[in-house]
Image (tube, rainbow, N blue to C red):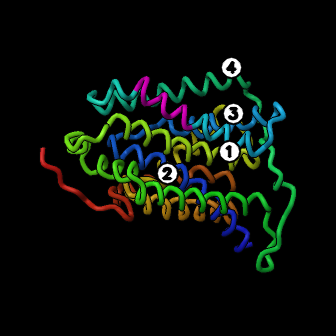
Amino acid sequence: MIVDQLINGIVLGSVYALMAIGYTMVWNVLRFINFAHGEVYMGGAFVALYLALLDMPLWLAYVGGVVAGALLGYLMEKVVYKHMRTAPKLNLLIAAIGIAILLQNVAQFVFGASPERLHSPFLTESVLIGGVLINQHYVFIIIIAIIVMALLEIFINRTLMGKAVQAAAQNIHATELMGINANKVISITFAVGSAVGAIAGILVGPIFLVYPTMGVFAGLKGFTASVMGGMGNIPGALVAGLMLGIVESFATGFISSGYRDAVAMVILLVILLVRPQGIFGKIVQEKV
């Protein structure tokens, strides 16, 4: 029982960690929380679902969902957020919530409100690992999450664009003075973070189904993980996502599944009250 819940927690935590990356990357360059990130998670899953229903090869449908998620994040930034960068943060927050509600309603109008299951070739098979029987799709989620995190590490630390993203995270205005195209950096940051969010949605589509509001709690849990890890701290967000998934899994298994979504909210409140800079974050003083 304990091992089963631990495995479930690692699977959930991998998804929450991927979601947290999107919040963290956008925060790094704009100091703003994109509360429409959960709808990118939903959008990627829906596109993958319907591409698969059109008899497209499953792997290509998954890739199409990821590309759609990246494009959605890119358009969000270009059409809305780019024109509001100098606006008060409250205006950006309201705009993000408005985009989220709009995308939920568009998804319901286009795809319908009925939950649908995204196909996975691994869902009905299990594998024996260390004496424990594990669903192959759970193993698939963990492997893909590890690959995505490794690729993200390479992108951020070993590519010129990744270095530009790091520079923008330090000081966006100084980045522009150095001749780096800040608009391009921000757009790519949105696209990459959104692609990772879409991957998370596609990974859970075969388990939790795909429906227009699936991104609401997933987005909140990704946000909780990013706060736990310290806003702007990508390694912290990854560790916090895993921690959140494991705690949620044990709470579901040993208390009640009815408290599943409440666990993340309680943790978020406690972190904000006790250590608002996050478990791995630092208090930074800024001159104003």
Q: CA distance from mark 4 to mark 1?
A: 20 Å
Check residue 279 in the rendering and tell me which mark sits there, or answer none: none
Residue at image mark 2 = 20
Q: Nearer the viewer, mark 4 or mark 3?
A: 3
Query: Is-magenta flag for residue 131?
Result: no
Marks 2 and 4 in Cβ contact (< 8 Å): no
The answer to whether any part of residue 210 appears in the image is yes
Q: Earlier in the sequence, mark 1 or mark 2?
A: 2
Q: Position of residue 76 (x, y in %)?
A: 47, 29
Alpha carbons under labels 1 and 2: distance apart: 16 Å
Up/down of 145 relative to 101, above or below: below
**Can you tell which quarter of the image residue 45 is in?**
top right
Q: Magenta span: helix, strand or loop, mainly?
A: helix
For residue 109, the mark is 4
**Residue 8 quadrant:** bottom right
Q: Is residue 270 visible?
A: no
Q: Position of residue 139 (x, y in %)?
A: 73, 63
Q: Amino acid at mark 4?
A: Phe
Q: Give SS at disc 4.
A: helix
Circles 3 and 1 in contact, beta carbons < 8 Å? no
Observer-nearest of 115 and 71: 71
For label 2, the crowd category at 10 Å Cα-Cα, with few meaning under 14, some 14 to 19 and many 20 or more, is: many
* Residue matched to label 3: 47
Asked whether, in this view, residue 130 is left or right of residue 202, the answer is right
Q: Would residue 251 be found to the left or right of residue 266 on screen? A: right
| Nearer the camera: disc 2 or disc 3 | 3
245 displayed left or right of 26:
right
- Dot 3 surroundings within 10 Å: few (below 14), some, or many (20 or more)? many
Residue 266 rendering spot, x and y as whole percentages = 49, 54
- Can residue 72 be found in the magenta stretch? yes
Query: Along the polypeptide, which appears first: circle 4 or circle 3?
Result: 3
